[in-house]
Image (cartoon, rainbow, N blue to C red):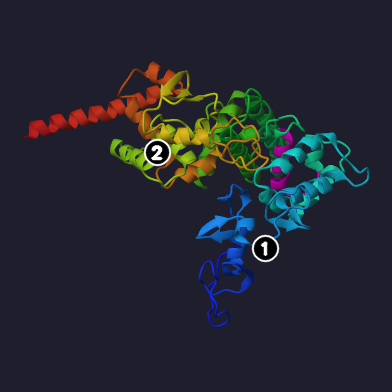
């Protein structure tokens, strides 16, 4: 990254730079004049093809155009002593790519045996070949990364369990785990399921009594974890919701203990008092109480108001049109974010479903762009297809070792993973709230076709689309009723 320019000082350096014309300290005298440090660095990083046909670094200037050293007469050492390539030298006469290779071999080789573990060989190769080698050097030279990798290199075996035992921050551990998985050093596993199991073990320690702890343990194992085990992968929403559910259940059971009640002694007035004397999140106990009733742990006559559906705000038709215009015809969002926004605002898709799309779901040809949502393939008309075309040509996040052959449409920063749903929501927030946009779109779409067809096409359960259809129909009925009243008055 180029250093930010400081303001020039004509008093200290009265002779201006021969390139930029600003008054900074001169670090070299080239045929076109004295060169300041900023222009010197830029010259070393200027690459292209000289008029003589030479391809590589073009530090010189001839008639205002970049030129090679031979044509311009610039004296500059940019020849890597290891690979011989022209490049900005980093250390010891080596370019950054060769320096990265030296660092990787040094850190990932076991100092006791002098041999690199077989599992680490493909990871080392990927790091050495990453397109943005300067990023690799910066990352691996961080103390916490270096320390973690050195501990990993000395591990007798490389497994998920061993990785969990190594000292270090979870963020570093998870990123390196992702690299190991992506390059075949470790098998894939459902990280959210593992994280939830680890979290649940710690959460049980917050329960006040052994009897209540057994109840929470049963609730976690036979209700929440059983459902997770039936999923191919645990969605992030399920992970967060399950943590929140257990947290509220623990708080409720601890409240009962503090007030001298056992769970089997729970009465309606106790439940009502707990709900009334606390934040609104206490209402999430409505997920625990039905399970407790089903398991015959509490009075079956207990009741608790469930969350009312249909109360979330949604974009009106005019707001949806304005959002589409902003997404398609402005540059407020990146290409990746524009493609995701179109799937939400036009097709009413959940962000969680959008971010899990792969290039197997998208077909891009010279004439047409199609995308499979649910059981139906939709053709994206122009200009809605343009962001997806650009994304297919340049998927992004391919300059490091994190995504060597990733099939995700919306790649994330973690190795081999798609972008996080919360991150995508935050990126789209400047244009619209994804939930309000999705609900508004479904509200309008249900006016245009039968419920089964819309549900099947967009990948929704028919009952979900039916609720939206009922809502849109009731709104239309209110409009008709209001129109009739106005006619009667007039």
Of the pair 126 and 479, the residue shown nearer to us: 126
Number of on-image labels: 2
Residue at the bottom extreme, as displayed = 11
Residue 434 located left or right of residue 236: left
The rendered magenta stretch, by its main secondary structure, is classed as helix
Residue 300, position as x, y percentages in the image: 55, 26
Element class at badge 2 = helix
Residue 306 appears in the rendering = no
Direction right: furthest residue: 112
Q: Position of residue 392 (x, y in %)?
A: 51, 33
Q: Quadrant of residue 153?
A: top right
Residue 396 position (above or below residue 373): below
**Residue 464 visible to an observer of this rendering:** yes
Q: Is residue 133 magenta?
A: no
Q: Position of residue 201 (x, y in %)?
A: 73, 38
Between 112 and 270, the one lying in front of the other is 112
For the C terminus, the image quarter is: top left
Q: Secondary structure at mark 1?
A: loop
Quadrant of the frame with the N terminus: bottom right
Q: Residue at x 39, y 34 (%)?
A: 345
Find out whether residue 174 is within the magenta segment.
yes
Residue pointed to by mark 2: 436
Q: Earlier in the sequence, mark 2 or mark 1?
A: 1
Rendered image quadrant of residue 199? top right
- Residue under label 1: 75
Magenta highlight range: 166-181
Residue 261 higher or lower than 303, as above or below? below
Q: Percent from the top left, x then y, of residue 281?
A: 52, 43
Choose top left, top right, bottom left or bottom right for residue 2.
bottom right
Contact? badges 2 and 1 (CB < 8 Å): no
């Amino acid at each position: 990254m180029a250093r930010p320019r400081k303001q020039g000082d004509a008093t200290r350096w009265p002779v201006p730079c021969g390139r930029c014309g600003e008054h900074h300290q001169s670090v070299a005298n080239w045929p076109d004049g004295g060169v300041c440090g900023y222009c010197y660095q830029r010259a070393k990083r200027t690459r292209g093809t000289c008029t003589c046909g030479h391809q590589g670094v073009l530090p010189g200037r001839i008639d205002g155009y970049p030129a090679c050293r031979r044509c311009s007469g610039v004296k500059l050492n940019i020849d890597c002593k290891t690979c011989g390539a022209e490049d900005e030298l980093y250390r010891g006469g080596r370019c950054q790519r060769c320096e990265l290779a030296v660092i990787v071999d040094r850190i990932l080789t076991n100092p006791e045996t002098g041999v690199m573990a077989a599992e680490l060989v493909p990871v080392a190769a990927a790091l050495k070949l990453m397109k943005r080698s300067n990023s690799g050097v910066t990352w691996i030279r961080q103390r916490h990364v270096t320390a973690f990798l050195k501990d990993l290199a000395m591990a007798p075996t490389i497994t998920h369990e061993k990785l969990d035992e190594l000292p270090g921050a979870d963020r570093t551990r998870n990123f390196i785990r992702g690299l190991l998985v992506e390059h075949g050093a470790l098998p894939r596993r459902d990280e959210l399921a593992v994280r939830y199991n680890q979290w649940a073990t710690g959460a049980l320690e917050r329960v006040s009594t052994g009897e209540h702890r057994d109840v929470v343990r049963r609730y976690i194992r036979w209700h929440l974890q059983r459902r997770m085990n039936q999923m191919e992968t645990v969605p992030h929403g399920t992970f967060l919701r399950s943590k929140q559910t257990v947290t509220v259940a623990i708080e409720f059971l601890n409240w009962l203990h503090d007030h001298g009640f056992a769970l089997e002694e729970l009465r309606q007035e106790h439940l009502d008092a707990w709900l009334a004397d606390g934040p609104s999140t206490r209402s999430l106990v409505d997920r625990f109480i039905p399970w407790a009733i089903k398991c015959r742990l509490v009075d079956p006559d207990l009741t608790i108001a469930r969350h009312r559906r249909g109360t979330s705000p949604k974009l009106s038709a005019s707001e949806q049109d304005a959002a589409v215009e902003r997404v398609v015809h402005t540059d407020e969002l990146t290409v990746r974010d524009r493609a995701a926004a179109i799937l939400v605002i036009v097709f009413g898709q959940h962000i969680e479903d959008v971010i899990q799309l792969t290039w197997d779901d998208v077909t891009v040809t010279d004439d047409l762009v199609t995308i499979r949502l649910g059981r139906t393939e939709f053709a994206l008309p122009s200009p809605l297809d343009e962001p997806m075309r650009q994304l297919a040509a340049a998927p992004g996040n391919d300059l490091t070792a994190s995504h060597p052959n990733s099939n995700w449409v919306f790649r994330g920063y973690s190795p081999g993973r798609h972008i996080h749903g919360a991150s995508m929501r935050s990126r789209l927030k400047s244009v619209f709230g994804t939930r309000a946009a999705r609900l508004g779109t479904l509200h309008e779409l249900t006016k245009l076709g039968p419920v089964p067809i819309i549900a099947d096409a967009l990948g929704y359960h028919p009952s979900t689309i039916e609720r939206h259809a009922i809502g849109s129909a009731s709104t239309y009925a209110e409009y008709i009723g209001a129109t009739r009243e106005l006619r009667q008055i007039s």
